[in-house]
Image: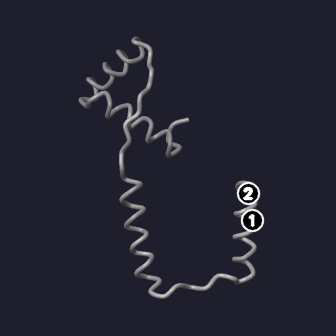
């Protein structure tokens, strides 16, 4: 099943993998733990963004946030997270 197109570099990596041209590194489990730690540290970071909203939309979002009892930034972040995870279409 094909999910996406591979670029030239990715095709070369796939070819080498399928031909068995890769060798396992020493202390593989230790290296895996190290890189999992790096990934976790970087993927959990939050980033600030600037976004332009109409005043009416912002007032409506703030109103909904008050109804939910949460800060409006938290509501916006939650909605964007749900959308990015496929929970909102």
Position in image of residue 4 (x %, y %): 71, 54
Q: Which mark is residue 69?
A: none
Vertical side of 20 occupied by 2: above or below: above
Residue 28: horizontal and vertical position, in percent?
47, 83
| CA distance separating discs 1 and 2 | 6 Å
The C terminus - image quarter: top right
| Within-10-Å neighbours for mark 2: few <14, some 14–19, many 20+ | few
Q: Which residue in the structure is indicated by mark 2?
A: 7
Residue in front for this viewpoint, 3 or 42: 42
Which residue is pictured at 38% across the width and 18% down the height? Answer: 58
Task: Give the residue pinned by disc 1.
Answer: 11
How many residues crowd around disc 1 within 10 Å: few (fewer than 14), some, or many (20 or more)? few
Kindly give the residue lying farthest to the left in the view shown: 69
| Image location of residue 6, percent across then percent down | 73, 58
Residue in view at x 73 percent, y 78 percent: 18
Asked if the residue under mark 2 is in contact with the one under mark 1, i.e. CB atoms within 8 Å, the reply is yes
Q: What colour-coding does the image apply?
A: one colour
Above or below — where is 54 with respect to 11?
above
Q: Which element carries disc 1, helix, strand or loop? A: helix
- Label 2's element? loop
Q: Hey, which residue is sitting farthest top in the picture?
A: 56
Instruction: Give the left or right position of residue 77, taking residue 9 as reference.
Output: left
Dividing the picture into quarters, in which one does residue 52 lie?
top left
Between 18 and 81, the one lying in front of the other is: 18
Residue depicted at 36% across the width and 50% down the height:
45
């Amino acid at each position: 099943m094909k999910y996406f197109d591979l670029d030239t570099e990715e095709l070369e990596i796939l070819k080498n993998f399928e031909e068995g041209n890769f060798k396992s590194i020493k202390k593989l489990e230790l290296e895996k733990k190290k890189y999992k730690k790096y990934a976790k540290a970087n993927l959990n970071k939050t980033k600030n963004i600037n976004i332009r909203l109409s005043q009416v939309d912002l007032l409506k979002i703030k109103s909904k946030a008050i109804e939910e009892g949460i800060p409006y930034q938290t509501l916006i972040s939650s909605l964007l997270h749900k959308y990015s995870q496929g929970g909102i279409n």
